[in-house]
Image: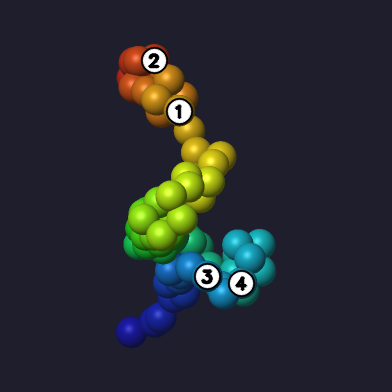
Amino acid sequence: MASRPLPVNVLAGPGALPVSELAAAGAARVGAGSAIAEAAYGLVRRAARELLEKGTTTTPEGGFDYATLNAPLLDGPAD
């Protein structure tokens, strides 16, 4: 039976090579898996600790407001 090359999928996260290097090494698809959600959970933890320990709320600065978050939902289905 002849073999043929199969696509390589890479699960990237903190410390992973840049996508361009993974692609150059033969990766056909690069995904973040749970890394993005884990980063969000880390932000929530840091923000809660800041609020409880310092009484301040600077950690979540730079987040999206509700209008920005809801805009894609209000635009309707993509064409």
Q: Which residue appears at 39% of the width and 82% of the height?
A: 2
Q: Identity of the amino acid at label 1?
A: Asp
Q: Which residue appears at 45% of the width and 28% of the height?
A: 65
Residue wearing tag 1: 65
Q: Position of residue 69 (x, y in %)?
A: 41, 28
Rate crowding at label 1 as few (under 14), some (14 to 19) or many (20 or more) other CA atoms within 10 Å. Answer: few
Q: Are marks 4 and 1 in contact (CB under 8 Å)?
A: no
Residue wearing tag 3: 14
CA distance for labels 1 and 2? 17 Å
Residue wearing tag 2: 75
Q: How many marks?
A: 4
Q: Position of residue 72 (x, y in %)?
A: 40, 23
**47 sits to left or right of 62:** left
Residue wearing tag 4: 17
What kind of element bears circle 3?
Answer: loop
Q: Identity of the amino acid at label 4?
A: Leu
Which badge, 1 or 2, comes first in the chain's sequence? 1
Picture quarter with the N terminus: bottom left
* Camera-nearest label, 4 or 1: 1
